[in-house]
Image (spheres, grey):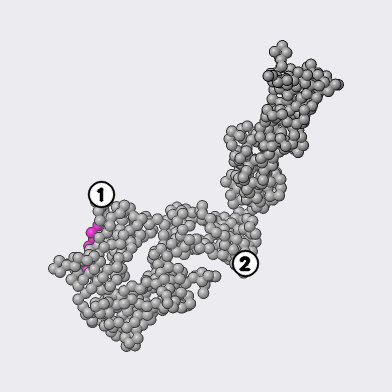
Amino acid sequence: MTSSKAKINFQKTFRNNERILIRPYVSAAFHDEDNDGLLPLSALSSPVQVDLTVWDDASPTDTYQLLWNGELVGPEKAVGDIAESGDPLTLEIPIDQLTEGVYSLAYRTVNTENNVADDSDSIRIEVDTTPPGRPQLGPIAFPPEVQNGLTSEELTQLGDILTAEISSYTGMAKHDVVVVSWGSVEGPSTTVTGDDMGLRRVLVKFSRDFLETIGDLEHEVTYIVTDRAGNRSTVSLGTSVKLLLAELPTNFPAPIVDQAIGDLIDFSEAKAGVDVDIPLYSGAAEFDRIVLHWGSEILLPVEVPLGNADEDPVLTLTVPYETIAKNPVGKVAILYDVLRQGQLLGSSLSTTVDVFITRPGPIELSAPTIQGTSVSNPNVEDNFIDEDDYELNSRALISWKDGFEISDDLNLHWGQQTIEQWYQIKNSDIEQAVDLKLPIPNTIMRDQGTGAEIPVSYSINRFGNPNISESPQQKVVVRSKEELPGGSAGLEGPVFNTVPGGIVVGPIENPNGADVKIAPYINILKDQTIRLIFTAFDDNNIIIDEAGYEGYRELDENDVVHGYTFRIPDENLRRICKGYGEAFFKVEPPPGSNQSPSNSKVTRVRINMSRPATGCTAR
């Protein structure tokens, strides 16, 4: 049984092999040179009109209807009685169909008399509702000249055009319009081209005329992107840029380096920090911020203190070792900038200093190993000189390390005794590269005397190098046959006046210097001479020579009963500021006694004389 309903013929109709249905046209989607069917965002708020024309041989009852991605949408319309071939017809894309995507658009005609249907060729229609740059546009990138502020001279060197770069962002496409804002001022705009797409970046140019309208202030520079469909991005991340186009003074008086240092800054001077005076400059004001430049290094800003605006110098800055070490050898230019309320007020002339802080020898030295040389009753323990060894020369083992050079002078330090040019490195030493075994004369041990912790080290001098390298100290036990002060156990170390319950010397307990007491000891005698030796170290255990101290006392009858207290001066402690102190004392026998000199154990304490508000420079 066959159906009584006629079947629709979907084959297209041709005449003389020519298609007779003209493609639809959407004027809103073909609005620019790309002509690719993109609907602007503004067209999506109402149904979009589609234009077509009456086809040849159309009957008034023939119908036409939109095909949207191959599906019929919208109303089916009849041609009508008054229409003739070529007359305009319109359809509309419904609003509910205008969602994100790419579509094919055509229309279907139907001969209602015989139910034959023909479809036109399709055209491409695109709906884009996604803003560019999601989820976030990156910051605009400026050339290095804008760091620390763009000056007029720098802008001139750039050809009076400041060019910034916007890197590729999500959805970047030709015809995107990029508009930059400099603070609240809208700046230039640029349109993405095919070349930009190839390089995956967009360049934005700022003329001098535009930049000079901004003023010498710091602003956030941002941008937004509007794509060809009219989608507008959110504001990009900002880049902070400071303009310094006004001519600023560059002739403030040059900084003055501590004149006590002389013509060359060596390691020990650099280690303590170098003071730089900022002279009184024109228009100085309290709370101006001074930024010191040490070569390529820039120190943190320091404010001119209250009441110092009329002083000369207005400020003294201490350049730390870590900054000086960035340019260890050579000439260094020093200058400063003056900032007021965050803006550059001017810069100084420069001062040049010579720096040489590289020390001779290997980077890391090992402490020497000390050995006795007696053979009749040998003691093979390292760093222990017994009663038999004490009568003879001893020897030191020096670990060989890369970094020694021919003619390097080694100096021996045994307690408070020193042998200059103890040994000079030879060519054979360099060739063999083995540990050195060097003799130590008996006289230096006897001059120092016995003790439980005699510090022994060596240092290196090199011709042409102003610095000295010092090895770590080796603690050596030295005993003699004579009866020693302190008895067989030796002398205990001196006692510091420290923070209660701790081992810290601070400004409260020691406002006028550190008291160091030597208590009565076994075999204490009137007319013995006590010599206190105090050695200062910084936090890196580098000796601070200028903070060391030695004190002498010939004991009287009262000292024999009560002991004696030395005082290390306050100024020595403040030169340490934060570090460590080591003290021991040496007992030298009374005249005519057969007693040998004896050294106490070493007492090590933490030194911290800093106050939160003033540091170590004032009480």
Displayed quadrant of residue 308: bottom right
- As for residue 619 lying within the magenta part, the answer is no
- Foreground residue among 39 and 610: 39
Identified by mark 2, the residue type is Asp
Number of other residues with Cα within 10 Å of mark 1, as a class: few under 14, some 14 to 19, many 20 or more: few
Residue 77: x %, y % from top left = 79, 27
Write down the region rendered in magenta.
436-443
Residue 466: x %, y % from top left = 38, 58
Camera sees residue 153 = no
Q: Residue at x 59, y 63 (%)?
A: 303
- Foreground residue among 495 and 554: 495
- Foreground residue among 307 and 457: 457
Give the residue at mark 1.
431
Q: Residue at x 39, y 64 (%)?
A: 542
Q: State the residue lying farthest toward the front.
A: 1
Residue 463: x %, y % from top left = 34, 55
Number of other residues with Cα within 10 Å of mark 2, as a class: few under 14, some 14 to 19, many 20 or more: few
Quadrant location of the N terminus? top right
Give the residue at mark 2.
310
Camera sees residue 239 = yes
SS of the residue under disc 1? helix
Tell how many labels: 2
